[in-house]
Amino acid sequence: MQKASTRLCDVEYQTKLAALIPWDKGAPVINGPGVYGASPGKDFLYLIPTVGERPICFSAEKLPPGLLLEKESGMIKGKAEQKGEHEVLLKAENKHGKTEKALKLIIADNALALSPPLGWNSWNCYRSKIDDSKIRSIANGMLSSGLAARGYAYVNMDSGWQSKRRGGKYNSIVPKDEFPDMKALCDHIHSLGLKAGIYSGPYVVPWGTDGCGTSSGLWDTNFSRAGEGRYVGVNKHEHEDISQWAAWGIDYFKYDWAETDMILTERMSTELKKSSRDIVFSITTNVNIKDAAKVKELVNLWRSNEDTGPEWKSVLKNGFNNQQWNHVIGPGHWFDLDMTAILPRDGKHLTPNELISCISCWMMRPSPILIDCEPGKLDDFTLRLLCNEEIIAINQDILGRPAASILHNESWDIQLKPLSDGNYALGFFNLGGEAALAPKIDLSCFGLKEGFRARDLWNRQELGEIEKDFVLGVEARCAKVFKIFMS
């Protein structure tokens, strides 16, 4: 077996991003995690994420009763009739060839988000200036850009959709005039095989809007105030709002307040679990580590950080130094590093190296990946960054184990993440301001044998057998990610 060079003159500092594989050309390849969960008796929708020239003919063996596959679109729909685990074999064929992939479908209570959600969030892109037309355009762009073919499924409306009044069948939050028919909007998103997300907070007036939140009335003094209008009201509306969102077809809910307590979290979690629809539950932004066991029981995603902005210090603060949460991270329960900050804002932006480091960290953690830029306007670099199937596979690995820092200081963070196939992902993050050689680490201390084989995931390149004295260089504020094969 060829061995990787260790001479200093051969050290390559640059992180090379492999050329993008066109999503709509060539033979089919099925992407996505090897597991997906849903509740029995509730609407089911799963778009088989597949690259390859259209038309593609899809098929699936051993789908559970109540689910059907649309052969032309690759959407699995219906309502699974009963609980159980089902080993489904997905197949895809076009004029260039055919492929197959095993998918375990888990039909059970509380089986959502068995891998970190991938999708889009409106806040960094539009702030509160969102409307029906923009959201439809984003959903269409998820398909045309190839993001959906790589597993990005959620189209999430952050704050800004709400009006100042309640009403309708459920006495729920009424959308502002720019959203004339929320059900029709959700139906459009679903017709593409994608999922719809929405936002609220327990405050009378949530962050980012002057519209309604999920409480009303005078201040409930059991909960702290966060400013004018930012307080929890004595009238709680979790049931009304969830009932309406389920009727519209919402699939994901972000709940946002300053003191992210478990009392209000549990109230909302209870209503979501009783809902007629599966809705992934995300809470932000200040979950306390003392509530780790409780938050794992109640929600699918949680944050204990500020919003990520297009600054290196923001990436450092949100992306690193959160290993205290590792013991509660896993399938169905993810620590959320927040949406990406690809878009420049207020004269600030992340450099290409900083973006590589950011996405590498989010993928390795693994965090949900909710992008903040318009899918239909992505340049080649950003597409290479977001659509590398091998990096995404690390994030979506069914074992769901978080990366652990095996070395961390002001200049470096070296992360090791176990994978479901018995191998590992290994990430080197140069946190400093100059290109540098990575510190040498003895992986045998972690049970990895000497002379393992490695693959550069960003460049999609086999490196051969790695010697013990392998020398690795990384550019400033950048990262390299490898898959380490144990046999």
Image: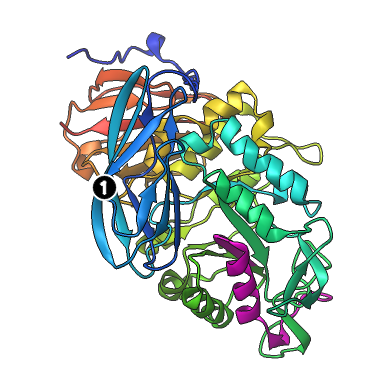
Q: Which residues are magenta?
A: 227-255
Residue 470 is at least partly visible in this image: yes
The number of numbered discs placed on residues in the rendered structure image is: 1
Residue at x-position 59% and y-position 54%: 196
- Give how far across and how far down residue 68 sits, in percent: 37, 50
Looking at the picture, tell me which residue is in the foreground, 443 or 461.
461
Looking at the rendered structure, the kind of residue marked 1 is: Val
- Give how far across and how far down residue 194 sits, in percent: 54, 47
The answer to if 426 sits in the magenta stretch is no
- Above or below, 230 against 140 in this view is below
Looking at the picture, tell me which residue is in the foreground, 46 or 359.
46
Looking at the image, residue 319 sits to the left or right of residue 444; the answer is right
| Residue tagged 1 | 88
Q: Secondary structure at mark 1?
A: strand
Looking at the picture, tell me which residue is in the foreground, 59 or 452.
59
Q: Residue 232's quadrant in the figure?
A: bottom right
- Above or below, 355 against 404 in this view is above
Residue 330 is at least partly visible in this image: no
Looking at the picture, tell me which residue is in the foreground, 395 or 253.
253
- Above or below, 148 against 266 in this view is above
